[in-house]
């Protein structure tokens, strides 16, 4: 990859140490991957692409963090929020902590994909909706094919 293009990418460092630290991408279109060693790799995403980043860590006493973030990769010069292991950062659409809530988001993603929709293409506003509903202790609305078609039409008019 040339340096100019690479400077536009959002990089996510993934670590996998079985039963200690596990991070993975649940969905996202990876533009580039670099393997650092047998436990670490860096994946990169193009600007405006969406990805879900899951982190889990434990110590001798049990789980210390379980978290999912759904992030929109930003263009260079755009405002962004910082996030551990994500450089430079991104537009965080959803940030959920605690394994029961993380599992609920993962099930929501599964339902979207079961409906034949790529989670990478879901409306940005829907992920914010899911985050707000879950933080209020409520079930988010389903993301239906009709809702997705409306989003695609709206997006095409904005371009």
Image (spheres, rainbow, N blue to C red):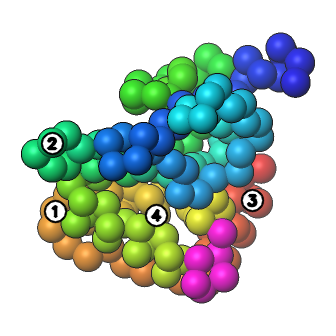
- Label 3 with label 2: CB-CB less than 8 Å: no
Q: Between residue 91 and residue 68, name the one nearer to us.
A: 68
Which of the numbered marks, if any, corresponds to residue 83? none
Q: Give the labeled residue for mark 2.
A: 60
Q: Magenta segment: does it hold 117?
A: yes
Say whether disc 3 or disc 2 marks the residue closer to the N-terminus.
2
The image quarter in which residue 138 lies: bottom left
Q: Nearer the viewer, mark 3 or mark 2?
A: 2
Q: Give the labeled residue for mark 3.
A: 157
Res. 147 visible in picture? no
Q: Residues within 10 Å of mark 4 (few under 14, many from 20)?
A: some
Task: Give the spatial CA distance, label 3 vs label 2.
Answer: 53 Å
Residue 45 in the figure: left or right of residue 6: left
Task: Give the spatial CA distance, label 2 vs label 1.
Answer: 32 Å
Which of the numbered marks, if any, corresponds to residue 126? 4
Q: Between residue 148 and residue 1, name the one nearer to us.
A: 1
| Label 3 residue SS | helix
């Amino acid at each position: 990859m040339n340096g100019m293009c690479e400077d536009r990418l959002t990089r996510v460092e993934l670590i996998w140490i079985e039963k200690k630290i596990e991070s993975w991408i649940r969905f996202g279109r990876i533009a580039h991957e670099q393997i650092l060693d047998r436990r670490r790799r860096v994946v990169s995403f193009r600007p405006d692409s969406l990805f879900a980043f899951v982190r889990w860590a434990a110590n001798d006493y049990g789980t210390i963090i379980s978290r999912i973030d759904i992030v929109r990769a930003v263009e260079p010069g755009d405002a962004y929020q910082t996030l551990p292991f994500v450089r430079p950062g991104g537009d965080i659409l959803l940030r959920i902590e605690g394994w029961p809530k993380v599992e609920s988001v993962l099930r929501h993603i599964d339902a979207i994909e079961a409906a034949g929709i790529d989670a990478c293409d879901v409306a940005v506003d829907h992920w914010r909706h899911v985050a707000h509903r879950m933080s209020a202790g409520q079930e988010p609305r389903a993301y239906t094919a009709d809702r997705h078609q409306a989003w695609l039409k709206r997006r095409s008019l904005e371009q």
